[in-house]
Amino acid sequence: MARSLAQEHARRADERAAAARPPGPRRAACPVIARRVVPTFTHVRIALVSTPFVAVPPRGYGGTELVVHELSRGLAAAGHQVTLFATGDSRGPDVRFLFPRAVWPPEPQAELRHCAAAARAIAEEPFDVVHAHAPALLPLGGALGAPLVYTLHHARDERLAAAYAGHPEVEFVAISARQAQLHPELACQVVHHGLDPARYPAGRGERDDAVFLGRLVPCKAPDVAVAAARRAGLPIRLAGAVHAGDATPAWHAVLARALARPGVLHLGTVAGERKLELLAGARALLMPLRWEEPFGLVMIEAMLCGTPVIAFPRGAAPEVVEEGVTGFLVDGEEEMAAVLAGLGRFDREACRRRAQARFSARRMVRDYERLYRRAAAVRHGGAGPEEASYAS
């Protein structure tokens, strides 16, 4: 059940008032030997701080929030006590919120207020680790009373990189080795995203078309995807929208020309079952990247349906795409078209099995549990393995 942070604050105040009442008769206390206590991470309290911009799980666009959803479910299934700081329209084991609904388009002040309210609530409770997915929480980390893990979900931003460098106490996590390489000053640990394979149906590629799914922005190059599909003689379906910050007249003109070509169908934003059907029925997902894609969640969504990914070797694509098994890396529009046209007897089941092995939510949860242990050990002065280890 979701609870507003105001409601939770009132509940905590009542608890403190009750605790302040004169105690009744007490039994004699047993002698205790003082020792340093470090969480063993068998069952611990974890605060996950999402963004205030998209609900968890997202109804449409929202890769970060989908990962937070998978992580909260997986950690709870592993026996941990998870509290999710998100928006009031989110779902999770214990949702706390400042904003009843997602704040869209994103507003920096909303993130600041969201993180400040979350930090106040976290400081009042005995959490063992805090895992942030919003950068505004970092300056407040010293008051949380628990080690702070922060996952970077974005491409390198010089302003944010400079701010991150001022927080050496934070355990930084990159979502790809390439993203970590582009942030050398942070010494990031790397955890690839993971999803629940059970949510992704095995597809046969029955429509035999190409698919582009993502924001319709220059760095993701939907115009190149259209050109490659048409060169290969295949129709293409595009799902996504232009965000306000990318809506320049020049880009609108480029996009309008691409979408007006024969065999091109723009579906707008898709989510849920429509997205799964779109991916499962395609011959391939096209990713003609013009930028350093930090991860590319849609790539593993396609692979989990058995649909190969044909991508330019930028960003995380060389880590995510396994050549000939889950997709192909190509140089340029012409090679993308040639590989797309030649995808005759691709083994979709082998693609799906490999994606399940590499990119499951269960694997992601295990990786983060290891990082939570590391963060706790560092905070407690490098505790020995028997004090800060997991239960086997």
Image: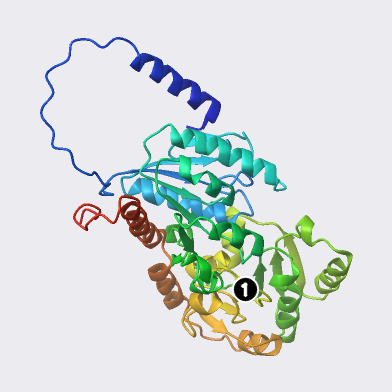
Classify mark 1: residues with Cα within 10 Å, few (<14), some (14-19) or many (20+).
many
Left or right side of 233 for 257: right
Residue displayed at 53% across by 30% down: 5
Give the residue type at disc 1.
Glu
Q: Determine the image quadrant of residue 254.
A: bottom right
Residue displayed at 57% across by 84% down: 329
Q: Determine the image quadrant of residue 344.
A: bottom right
In the image, 247 versus 273, the foreground residue is: 247
In the image, 249 versus 128, the foreground residue is: 128
Determine whether 282 is above or below 277 in the image. Answer: below
Is there any visible trace of residue 107 in the rendered image? yes
Left or right side of 392 for 229: right
Residue 20, position as x, y percentages in the image: 35, 14
In the image, 373 versus 242, the foreground residue is: 373
**Element class at badge 1:** loop
Is there any visible trace of residue 91 in the rendered image? no
Residue 226, position as x, y percentages in the image: 74, 76
Residue displayed at 59% across by 48% down: 136
Determine whether 9 is above or below 216 in the image. Answer: above
In the image, 59 versus 209, the foreground residue is: 59
Determine whether 47 is above or below 164 in the image. Answer: above
Residue displayed at 63% across by 42% down: 112
The residue that mark 1 highlights is 292
Residue 88, position as x, y percentages in the image: 57, 35
